[in-house]
Every structure is written in C-alpha cells, then in structure tokens.
Image (cartoon, rainbow, N blue to C red):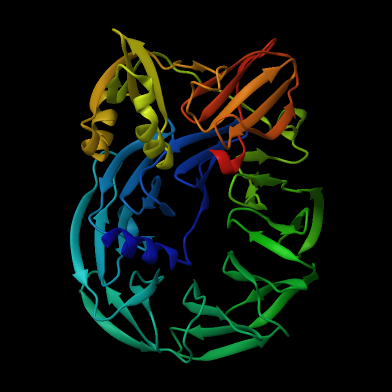
Amino acid sequence: MRIFASLALLASTILATSYVEHGRKAYLLDKADLRIVTTEGSRRVPLFGIPVTILVGSRPYVLTSQALFAVDTVNEQVSTAFRLDRAYSNAVLGAGDRIYLLGADALSVVQGSAAKMNLLYTYGLPRLASSMFLLPRGELLFIPSQGLNAFTYNPNTKKIADVKLPWAPRYPLLIGSTLVDRDSAGLRFFSLSTKKSSSINLGSEPTRVSIWQGKALAATPAELLLVDPLSATVLARRTIAGIRRLSTVDSEGFATVLAGNNLITLSLPSLVPADTFNASCPRTRNTRNTRNTYSSAYPFFGKPLFVCGDKLAIPGASPKTRGYLVQSVRITEGQAFSLQVGAFSNPMSFGPLMENLARQGLPYYYVEEGGLTRFRVGFFRTRAEADRFRSFLDDYGAWVIAEQSTRQLTHSIHDLNRDRRPDGIVAKADSVLVFTLSQRTWIEILKASQLPEPVTNVYLKGNRAFAELKHSGLKELVLPDSNQ
C-alpha cells in the first residue's frame, strides 16, 4: 500500500523542474534517467526510482521517489546518493545547498554535498500542503491541498505564520514574492508582501505558464504573452495557435514553443519569432497502443534543443547534429567496477531479472565466465561509487566486481527462437531495423533508419544499442522511445 500511496503523491506533483542548465551543460530528466546534454551529444546517468525534480546549487541535485542524488558535473556521474524513507512530491534548494523536501504531512531538511548528504531534521506540518516555494527572504511558503489557508515556515526560528489567500490556487507559481495562478479567464496575482490581489483578463485560460527573469510567459490557445506580475500588465503578445509545449531558461534570451509540428524560437522580451523548424515527432507503435511520442523543446545555450522520445536535435546547428539518429559513444578503457546480481548456468533464467532491472532503467550487461552467464549492473568509475549503489540492490545480494574494460558489448539478436529479449536490432548495409517480438515468431518492425555510412556490425549493451560504422567507428543508436 505504501508504494501506491507514493505513486499517487508523485502523480499529483505539478511543480517539478525537468530541465536546467549548469555550467556549459544541460540536465534533463528522462523517464528513469538523468540525461546530461552538451553540444557533443548526451550521456545517460541511471537513477533509482521515479524522477521528481532537478535542483541547482553548487551542483545539480536530482530527487526521485527513492533517493536524492548529487551530480558530479565534471565526470558526469552521481557522486553520492541519499536514500529516502518516504516519497516527496517537491523540493526547493536554500542557501548553502540546504535541500527542503515536501512530504505528505512533513518537511524534511537535507544538507546537500558532493561526498555525503545528511538528514538534518524532519518537521511535522500543521496541515497538508500540495506545493512549496522558497521566498526571497528565505522562508518557505506552503500552498494548502484545499482551501485558502496557506502558511509560511521560517527554517531559522522554526515558526509558522498563516497566510490567507484570496482564492483557492489551482496551478500556483511563485515569481519573486508574487503568487501567480491561472483561471478560466486569464491570470491572477497575489502579492505576499502587500497582501493585494489583481488579475488580467486574457479571454481564455492559459494552457502553459513559464517563468523568465521575473516575468510570466503565458500561452493561451491563440497567443503567447509576456506579463509583469508586479503591475499585472501585458508587456508583449504574439499570435501563435496550438501551442503544445513552452519552455524558457532565465539565462537565455529566447523561448521555445512547440505549436503543431513547428518548433518556434522567439526573442525575449519582444516575442519576435526568430526561427521556425519542422519538429514532427513520429508516432510509435507497440503491442498495446498507438500514441504520439513524447516531445518537448528547451533553450540550449543559444539554440533550441528538440527532444523526440529518445532522440535529441539541435536544428540547424551543424550537419553533425542535424541528423540525430546516431549519438557519439564515450568508452572508458581501463579498470571500472560493476555490481554482480546473478550467475546462471542456463541463460533462460535471466528473464525476470532482466525485466525488473530494465524497468528501473539500470544499465546491465552479462559476461560468460567459468561455464556461467554472469549478470551485472554498471559501470561505475570507482569502487566507492559502486558500493554506494549496492544498497539499492540488496534484495538481489549484489556485490562489487572489478572490470578491466567497460566495453562489454553483446552482438545483436540473430537466433530469434532462443533469445527472449523483447526487442532486437539487425543491420543491413547502411540501414538499421529495430523490431520487437510481439509473439514468439511474429516480428513487428518499428523503425528502419538510414545511417550516414555502411554498418559492419550491431551490438547491444543492456537496453542500449551500438553500430560499428565502417569509417567512424562505434556510435550509439537511438532506440524507439516506447521500447527502451
């Protein structure tokens, strides 16, 4: 029952941040992984649990349903993981990397760190809160799950103060000291310093609201507007129909909008369109349903970053990034560490174990040694990092293994009757077919993609795929999103 309660709590979260920039890298929450994106491509960092939000202090932190992770931005890996004893629906970061976690009826405070995170204390809240914000003066604002009785909490004095709201918030955002919300007619504002409320009638309810440099960027079904929350005035507006996604980053001078199949970049604060790209995200099929692949777009250091399922594109950046089927592979030679979670004489015994770990998004592989097929999770760059993650696999009796090379690749599926993996990859000349076994002998082709040069071989590593290209060597393939 606790698992279902945790999932329900996470499903109610509406304030999560899934994309941030830090240094010269972007960090994107994607299913069970953290994707670190640079102009050279992206790298997946496996996480445990359902991702909730990203925080940025001296380094990025990621909150999931099971743990809080600190990210080593230089080595692009998790530097420490703090396991949680309950699910949290939201988190904010205070001064000195102090992290405040909002639970169903309690506030927990964790001291963030690159090497070790510590729980400072847990404070019982006077009533249920649906969201939490950090005020400019360092206090925390809690929005009630229902009703008008919000309250603030001072972490230094441990004192609670009631705040009477003029309306019951639906989709609250905090911009400075002003609470911003949307209703059927437009936007509403409430100043926490003056206790005055105001509104702007936009003629319809905004479908998306983003924050940019102290301003609210709102999208209605027919237009995009930049609004000053302090004066409740419209600063700029632009007619754009059918907006599906909207994103800004404070450090960038443009917004990205997905409208229909168009990716539109607009200069801020003028809202003048700069470029329009075709950003159609193809439908994917599996054995259960047919749906649109998840797509979104973000500002990425002066260029738009388009995400289509598991694919990334920076439109118009260069021929290298324009064709985004192939991603660069970073292979670390030399000693690394992994976690062994099973060894079987009959590889067919892998089935349930593979399915369970793949569902968690863990990178796994297997090796043949001493007449046994050994199943391992990894890789980790240090023994200490592997040992930290071992606690998440206690149920499997995992132990740390030293590897001499991280290039442990398995050939693609050839004998379909013996292999029980649910998907497979076959290379032919300069094309790659990705297929799934819906039944034991029936193959449904999901994608046929042409690569920039002939393929000499295709490999699998866990749920990732790699092509050995004739001239440029090993490259990672982008698999269909619904079959990761």
**Does residue 480 appear anywhere in the picture?**
yes
Query: Is the residue 433 above or below the residue 311 in the image?
Result: above
Q: Position of residue 264 (x, y in %)?
A: 77, 55
Q: Quadrant of the N terminus?
A: bottom left
Q: Residue furthest left?
A: 121
Query: Is the residue 83 above or below the residue 87 in the image?
Result: above
Say which quarter of the image contains residue 458: top right
Q: Position of residue 95 (x, y in %)?
A: 33, 58
**Does residue 378 appear anywhere in the picture?**
no
Say which quarter of the image contains residue 258: bottom right
Q: Residue at x 49, y 72 (%)?
A: 176
The answer to whether residue 188 is left or right of residue 233 is left
Q: Residue at x 53, y 22 (%)?
A: 417
Q: Residue at x 34, y 23 (%)?
A: 375
Say which quarter of the image contains residue 477: top right
Q: Residue furthest top?
A: 370
Q: Position of residue 187 (x, y in %)?
A: 61, 82
The answer to whether residue 275 is left or right of residue 254 is right
Q: Position of residue 158 (x, y in %)?
A: 20, 74
Foreground of the two, 121 or 278: 278
Query: Is the residue 16 above or below the residue 184 in the image?
Result: above
Foreground of the two, 66 or 232: 66
